[in-house]
Image: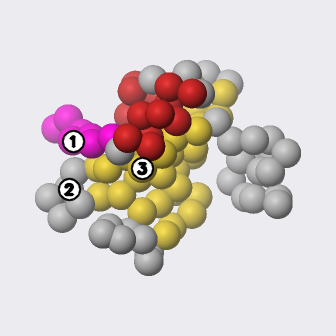
Amino acid sequence: MPLSLTFTGHALRAMMDEDIDFDEVRGAIEREDVIERYESDRPYPSRLLLGRSGPRPLHVVVATDEAGGHIVITAYVPDPTRWSGDFRRRTT
């Protein structure tokens, strides 16, 4: 079954700024490699996912609504000076 994705305006702007395409975001969500959880986020808890586009790391923050649809909150290429070498832990 295909993923149901909704993108916030912030996510679309961030993706445009960082040249991230929809397939990269979809791939990160399909892999569901969770590196942080934000249970107190509202209206739905969200999570930070690690994805890859070739050698390039990608972080996607996504929430899942009650119907199982995915809401993409943001996507970005993590700054290597602020993340561990595997891009799973913050260093600053």
Q: Which tag is nearer the camera, tag 3 or tag 2?
A: 3
* 25 left or right of 68 in image: right
Circle number at residue 73:
3
- Report helix, strand or loop for mark 2: loop
Mark 1 and mark 2: Cα distance apart in space: 8 Å
Read off the residue under disc 2.
68
In this rendering, the answer to whether 51 lies above or below 87 is above
Residue 4 marker: 1
Task: State yes or no: residue 4 in magenta.
Answer: yes
Q: Amino acid at mark 2?
A: Gly
At a point 73% along the width and 58% down the height, the residue shown is 89
Three-letter amino acid code at the position of disc 1? Ser
Q: Earlier in the sequence, mark 1 or mark 2?
A: 1
> Secondary structure under badge 3?
strand
| In magenta stretch: residue 26 | no
- Residue found at x 35% / y 44%: 8
| Location of residue 10 in the rendering, given as x and y in whole percent from the top left corner | 44, 43
Q: Amino acid at mark 3?
A: Ile
Are discs 1 and 2 less than 8 Å apart at CB?
Answer: yes
Q: Give the magenta range.
A: 1-7
Q: In which quadrant is the N terminus drawn?
A: top left
What is the distance, in whole Å, between disc 3 and disc 2 at their CAs?
A: 15 Å
Q: How many marks?
A: 3
Q: Position of residue 77 (x, y in %)?
A: 64, 36
Q: For residue 66, which quarter of the picture?
A: bottom left
Q: Are marks 3 and 2 in contact (CB under 8 Å)?
A: no
| 37 left or right of 85 in image | left
